[in-house]
Image (cartoon, rainbow, N blue to C red):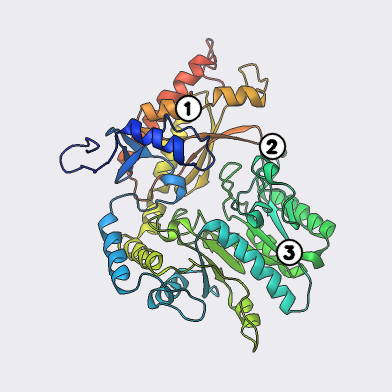
Amino acid sequence: MSAGLGEGEMVMMTKTTDEYRASASAHLWRHFAHPDASAINVMVRGEGCYLINSDGDRFLDGVSNMFCANLGYDYGAEFAEAASEQLTALGYQAIWGSASPVAIELAERISSHAPAGLSHVFFTPSGGESVEAAWKFARQYHGLRGEKRWKALSRRLAYHGTTMGALALMGLDDYRATFEPLVPGGVRFRNTYRGDRPADESEEDFTAFLLADLEERILQEDPATIAMLIVEPLQNHGGCLVPPAGYAAGVRELCDKYGILLVLDEVITGFGRIGAWFASERFGFEPDMITIAKGLSSANAPIGAVLIHDRIDEEFRQPGRVVNHGNTFGGHPVSCAIALRNIDIMERIDLPGRVAAKESELRATLEALMDLPTVVGVSGAGFFLAIELRSAALDGQRYSDSKLAEIYSHANIGARLAARGVLCRVMIEGGRPLMYIGLPLVADTSEFEVLAAALRGVFTDLAHTYGWFRADGPPAI
């Protein structure tokens, strides 16, 4: 039985689409989803920047399958070769009392692309576990120096993973509420969204405001109790928030002033998505640790890591000390082999450079949609952008959260885009509807045009449905 994808594209299946859906409903708990799977897409193949389902329908992957399929879907044979060679030689080796050659090689290779000083690598199975490990390392680091520090500061609306430790750093209340009380020590501070600030405020003044607000939060919590501060160089949730000029240097200065470790969460932004190997370099951050995952293997194997600065490593290298954390699958040889091949390919095609070269074209393509009353603005950098959508009626009255949920429901957005061959979704965050755009980093002009055409069609329909076009003039934004 096949998916009916056409000659040369056949994918063997053991059930029909409806049988797969019934089986999923009966047995598979999907992530952040209702157990009913009677209408899900059953994806069977990837090609370029497209996903193909069991009925042969093609969809442009507008979010790189969770912002992680950086290389798209054309390199499977190379990854299969790397995995097969490693499985044939050594399918598994823990990196506790010993290590595999491929884990050692990958650590060295990552270090060669990392910002200066971040030359040590601790492997994990995922991004959330990388964040959790970084918090543990920060606590142990301060303990080795004779300090009892345990708190971690993170920004409002920030997403840092869903394990119980990482969840304590989560800035999205809806994700946290079900599981409270959480691990103690997670503290929130203001992110870099400036929509609620005075319209005439200069960038310099905005940066000064943010840093003063952060320092006040540090003092409120007692600096002697704070182990680390974690930020995404470009914050995902909240609208792909780019830091203002001077912010990165100012955060570093405050961390140094109060003895706090600075951790950069680059689980999404690492490995080319912002047009550099690491976004921390593009935006001027100087971290003590960086957490990574998704792009490390372009999602072809589960793997994450924490990059650790020399100054932290020095503290652990003193006689009699050990890194007091570990897990079974961190540095799994097969995952490491796939990640190494991923870096090979990225270097071969200069993926970060390619994103830097195409960034302005993608952004301009999306900004052209601002002639529609549905679209308020575009933010972000590289191939990691957010489209802010309308949150008020034509008379300026803001819609309620429930009304926004109706307007930007899956039926109105996700399903209509899928019918036009594009996969994207809208999230309501802080009363703002936001559509995230994270195409595979190999996407080009043709993919930009497919995306824009689908968005224009859906956004135009939405504007007509909710009466956002003025009869007496240009569209009102």
What x and y, as percent, mark residue 12?
24, 43
Q: Residue at x 63, y 51 (%)?
A: 244
Q: Amino acid at mark 1?
A: Ile
Judge from the rendering whether residue 257 lies leftward or rightward of residue 348; answer left or right: right
Label 3, residues with CA under 10 Å away: few <14, some 14-19, many ≥20: some
On the image, which quarter does residue 390 sit in? top right
Name which residue type carries label 3: Leu
The kind of residue tagged 2 is Ala
Distance between mark 3 and mark 2 Cα atoms: 27 Å
Q: CA distance from mark 1 to mark 3?
A: 42 Å
Residue nearer the viewer, 302 or 347: 302
**Residue at (70%, 42%) from the top-left corner?**
177
Q: Which residue is mark 2?
A: 199
**Is the residue 76 above or below the residue 33 in the image?**
below
Which residue is labeled 3 in the image? 254
Mark 2 and mark 1: Cα distance apart in space: 31 Å
Which label is found at residue 238? none
Quick check: marks 3 and 2 in contact, CB under 8 Å?
A: no
